[in-house]
Amino acid sequence: MARKTSTAVLLVSTIIFGVICGAFLVQQTIRPIRSSELTPSSPSRHGLSPASAKRGRPMVASRQAVHATNKKYTMHNVMKKLFSRAPASYKFRTEYYEESIKSAMPSLNETASASSENKTSDTMDLDLDLDDNVAMWSAEPYKDEDGDIELEDILFYDLPLFCLFLGILLYVEVTACLWRRGRDFLVNTSMWKESGSQARGQAAKESQLMIFRPYATWFAVIGLWLVIKSAIDVFGKCYWNWYCWMDLDCNLRILTPAVAECTLDVMIPACVFTSILVCGVLACVWCFTRPWSSLVLFGTFITGIYAISTTSLFVYALWVFTAIGFNYFYFYILPYVAESPSWCEDLGSLALSNPPDCEMRDGDRQQNWEACAEPVEDPTREEMSVLSWTETAGWYVADFFQKNMRDWRILWNGLVMRCFVLLFCSQNIRVFGKENVQHIGSHDKVLLAANHRTFYDFFVITVSGIWANSGASFFSFYPVRSSFFYTNPGGILLNMIASAMAMIPPVLNTPSDKQKEATKPSTDAKRWNDFVIRRIVSELRTPGTVCGIHPEGTRNTSPDPYDILPTKPGIGRVSLEAEETHVIPVFIKGIESDLLEAFRKNWWSKETTDICIGPHVDVSDLQKRLKEGGNADELSVEAGERITDAIKKLAAAHKEMEEKEARESDKVCKSLGE
């Protein structure tokens, strides 16, 4: 975890340093040229021959607002500008060379007519140019429009948006602070053990909701930055035009200098001011719960106020890098030292895990990050040679998402995919056994084992059964047969849209499977599928991971919903090698393979979809025997059968419950009939 964070911080710091250096270099080397400097008296004087004029070679005129670059962002100038008219918006247009000469040099025609008898080469070139359409770029403000008062824009547009984003930041952080105080009180007293599973379930749910905390906080911070950037741009230095950006000449002479000025004079000061504001808000919110962390943030706030008062770009850059370095050392390096000092505190982490046969782990620092210190398993060249070209392409895309797009997967599956599942399967869902998963926290490792009826079984189970009734993480993945989702480009696209490539890794069909047309030779399929098992186990080392596997290995098309196919050995091997993992059996009934039928049933039918969640399947004794040198294949088969037996028990219990409900319903009908 610390290594991934250090890589991200190093990347962000490098980008910031590159942007500052690039903008400063552009500002010092590419000087915006005034319009008057590019108003020519003849084409040849500016290197424009008659031949090039006929080809329509464009000339460039720069912005007329160059004088604004000399205005300093002092308090006096900014306050004075607030009560004046805002700079009019810029327009980019292509003017004819003839029109620019006539507008810039009204006396040119008189001079040319006076010397018509003795024309020079320049006037000949001029006559040639007046007949040609040579383009000129310009970025002049509209003369027929007046801007609004800057203060009015700030009061009626920037201020409401500022309050909105600041309110989001305060709501998220104050909620986290209150929940953190409540958990600290329970952990530090005996009430934690007395309240039992109810308090653990509440803490687990809080940890799940706080998964979105960093994303909501960053959303509010970026919103504050955009509002502040807009508010302090009183001299109108930031603007953009796609038409000019696509033209190299206009881009280099007009847009590039403008972007450099905007970056140095507006965007970087806005970034500094936003960082100072956020540090001040966080210091105030967490001062009573995390005093040492608040002191660090308050120090960053004070030094930032001094930096912004100097209005020096060098001081801005120095403060940015110093603040990033010190806060990174305090919050991301010092806590993970072997003997961390007592004054080293996190910023109210609500991470939680309740591993089987282990004590509860409260906070991000308590999680077992050492288990995932090594990178996840990657296939060898020999294993990759088994795949077809579509399977290879799909694998590289899915592997990239799995390794580098964890945050995107969490947001997509926690919001978009969740809404999709609720649209098709939410109204008539019945969940049994909620108490078996309510203690699972945001950083628990979970292995779901369920019967297989449709291609989206686990989406419904995860959304309506696990996420809704526990604090399990929103980062989930589900191994899938490669016969469609990796052999067909449409399947790869569906996998990306529906689940952000959560259906990974692909499992190859073998001659023993039903789908003979998409099988691989037995040795090749086994070679790749062995890697699949290793990859799943390596993924389950990371805290906060949910994996769903069907022990049957293929979809069961039997008309009997309680029929369970024989177990494949893969899930048994995963359960043995994935330590500190909750193995949760699930039985689902009533789910439709046809999405349209599922949509109709969800909104216009009283038929139910039932999800039965069983207690954790204990395989610790088999894991112990494996460590002592037991036969891995035999133990894997035994573990798989134990998991399948748990699913069969759930199916039998559900069948008995439905028969009981049917008998009671018959009694009610008979009594009403009598």
Image (spheres, grey):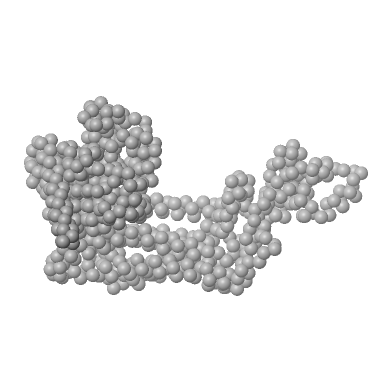
Q: What is the quadrant of the C terminus in the image?
A: bottom left
Could you tell me which residue is drawn at 37 percent across and 31 percent down? Answer: 389
- Residue placed most toward the observer, 328 or 613: 613
Could you tell me which residue is drawn at 24 percent across and 34 percent down? Answer: 529
Residue 344 locus on image (x, y percent): 26, 64
Residue 142 relative to residue 372: left or right: right
**530 in relation to 89, above or below:** above
**Figure quadrant of residue 327:** bottom left
- Residue placed most toward the observer, 623 or 286: 623
Could you tell me which residue is drawn at 67 percent across and 64 percent down? Answer: 145
Q: Using the rendered image of the protein, determine whether residue 421 is visible from the camera's viewpoint.
A: no
Residue 602 locus on image (x, y percent): 31, 53
**Figure quadrant of residue 149:** bottom right
Could you tell me which residue is drawn at 26 percent across and 68 percent down? Answer: 179
**Figure quadrant of residue 347:** bottom left
Residue 310 locus on image (x, y percent): 49, 68
Residue 673 relative to residue 395: left or right: left
**44 in relation to 330, above or below:** above
Residue 270 relative to residue 128: left or right: left
